Image (spheres, rainbow, N blue to C red):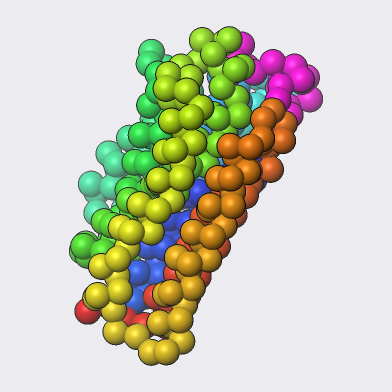
Amino acid sequence: MRLRTLPVSLSGVVMATALAKATGHFSWWPALLCLMFALLAQITSNFANEYYDYKRGADKVGRVGPRRGVTEGDIRPVTLLWVTFATLAAACVVGCLLIPIGGWWLLPMGIVIALAALAYSTGPYPLSYHGLGELAVFLFFGIVPVTLTYYVQALHMHPIVILASMTIGLLGVNVLLVNNYRDVDDDREAGKRTSVVIFGRRPAAVAYLINGYVAVALLTPLWMLSVFGKWSAFMLLLAPALYLMMHTLTWRALISRDGAALNPLLGATARNMLIFTLLLSAALIAQRLM
């Protein structure tokens, strides 16, 4: 399941739900369904990535990154394949429960999301093998979950939600960048052309740093549209300040480490994202948006 990366899908739903609360449109049932769907979709993508990377030979025994069960012989490949599609089916069932709330247009959107969960690693043009992994994460772990989670609660869109979805997308991209930064040598050998393989580690590290600062800057209008008290104002200032401090420290570790020493930074990047989201969400819940 790659539990350390699950804050990527969790953060988008939490952020959107906090925005729904701040605009007076919070609804717990759609929010819960979105949370379940987002987690199941990411787990499906993680399972599929492990299975299809094994089939393509992209994962090797004794790899630098965390142990892969199929590659190391802990799990039979056919078992993981069945579990992948069972998890995808569960996600589809949960997603269908949102149709009576948000409308039938959610059905084709759900199909696109389901296909994207697999297309990241397989199909005629696997996205992660052609330098499109970051774009997929930005769209399907940022734009899509934040906007849809907000919409099924409010049944309309708010300009801040679009900016928040871009923020979450950029923070999610950083989690993938760390993963690909660590695996660049193995990926190059396996013919997996991630963005880090294509452009190199130095541009990837620069992109990682910039993404964090741009993500925070995108939410600047939030301060202008907010009506808040002292507590929520403090939280609105604390969230970006604490995040940028942690983000910069993680970036410094990123450019100074190599090999297995990079493994903890994957969880650290996801942790930074979740802490920022939770602090900002707490501030939003304690205020209202104009």
Magenta stretch, main secondary structure class: loop
Dividing the image into 4 quarters, which one contains the C terminus?
bottom left
Instruction: Give, as a single range, the part of the protein colored magenta.
Output: 53-74
Q: Kindly identify the residue that appears in the image at 42 percent across and 75 percent down.
A: 236
Residue at 55% x, 45% y is: 251
Q: Position of residue 64 (x, y in %)?
A: 70, 25
Residue 139 found in image quarter: top left
Q: Is residue 97 above or below residue 71?
A: below
Residue 73 in the magenta stretch? The answer is: yes
Which of 189 and 95 lies nearest the eye of the viewer? Answer: 189
Q: Quadrant of residue 48?
A: top right
Q: Give the x, y percent position of residue 247.
A: 53, 53
**72 or 211, which lies in front?**
211
On the image, the x and y values in percent for residue 33 come to: 45, 58
Residue 238, placed above or below residue 197: below
217 in the magenta segment:
no
